[in-house]
Amino acid sequence: MIYQLSQFAFPDDPARLFPDTPGREWYLEIGFGDGRFWPPFAATFAQPPNYLGAEISGSSLQKAQARLKKAGLTNAHLTKLPATVLLAAVIPPASLDAIIVNFPDPWPKKDHLDQRLLRAPFFRLAASRLKSDGAVHFTTDHEEYFEFACCEAQESGVTRLELAPPPAAALETKYALKWKELGIQARHARFVSVAEPHALAATLPRPDIQAMPQEDAALPHAIVNLPPQFDLSDFAKSAVHTPGYTVVLLDAYRSLRRPEYTVLAHVEEGELTQEVLVGVMQRPDGSTLVRLAKFGGPVITAGVKAAVAAVTAELVRRGAVITHLGY
């Protein structure tokens, strides 16, 4: 199954995600590419562990889903999410048995090193989500990145390094085969967690993310009174920047049937990016409701609430009067 971010709970319960196999080990693979690793690796277990794969490439998502289905792995889910968002918001502390990272982008330029996944903050976050003695399994062809990751893991203070040959399944992935043809050897390490996960989790920030509420009234909203002959036809793109998020109001679209509008907003919060719709809708009593739309299953975050607030502020700038705030 492919999960959207809005389909998860924050944090989620592995028994909910894997109701047919709740007692099995749980593995997370970050950057699964076209999905070649997990089916043969899962076959090395008497009972395949529960599996969650994270990838940001949409085309890879579909290819990997087809491979999982062909292998008959029903306790395997995929999602198109940045790894740190998934770990921080969805995965509960002390719940994973292993995190697998095969051939990640090495970001080789010096001014791009902060783009690398395997840095000290990641190892601390990972250790808080791993069970005691759980590990990050890392395979790469990039010697400098391998040494960099080992140093960052040591700096994190929460892992123990174990060197070992790469799993056979890791050497049959797309990138492994490519480098193998060029005569480049892969390196493998297990970064075993030595931290107490719950204590470590308590020291780390948790994202302000909420699941989509069932009741419309619970959605971020405002009620305003608009001036006569209100019009957004001259709407212009605008942005709100804060240390925690950036909101860009991109465009406003008028309904063909009613004097109502939908505003498209782009929201960036760290690695999490969402595009959301904010409706500007007339109510029977003559007032106007400004509310986050459910379309697309947005996840309610501080930035998404700020998008509703930004639309409300634009209406106020055009003469609207606020009578109620719900964000």
Image: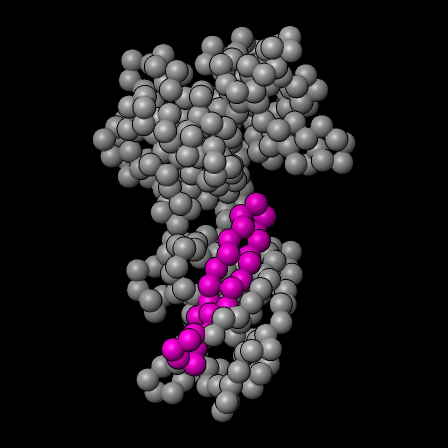
Membership of 86 in magenta stretch: no
Camera sees residue 5: yes
When the figure is inspected, residue 235 is found, relative to residue 123, above or below; the finding is below
Judge whether residue 274 is colored magenta.
yes
Would you say the magenta stretch is mainly helix, strand or loop? strand
Q: Is residue 90 left or right of residue 248?
A: left
Instruction: Report x, y in % for residue 236.
Output: 62, 71
Residue found at x 59% / y 81%: 317
Q: Quadrant of residue 70?
A: top left
Which x, y percent locates residue 296?
41, 55
Using the rendered view, name the quadrant where residue 139 is placed. Answer: top right
Q: Position of residue 35 (x, y in %)?
A: 44, 25
In the rendered image, the residue lying farthest to the right is 110
Q: Is residue 191 above or below residue 279?
A: above
Q: What residue is at 30 percent from the left and 64 percent from the top?
A: 215
Towards the viewer: 22 or 241: 241
**Compared to 301, does 281 lie above or below?**
below
| Total marks in image | 0
Query: What span is in magenta?
Result: 255-280
- Foreground: 249 or 240? 249
14 or 205, which is in the foreground? Answer: 14
Residue 189 in the image: x percent, y percent? 56, 16
* Quadrant in the picture for the N terminus: top left
Q: Residue at x 40, y 26 (%)?
A: 27
Nearer to the camera, 266 or 321: 266
Check the image and name the residue furthest to the front.
256
Q: Is residue 214 left or right of residue 126?
A: left
Q: Is residue 187 visible?
A: no
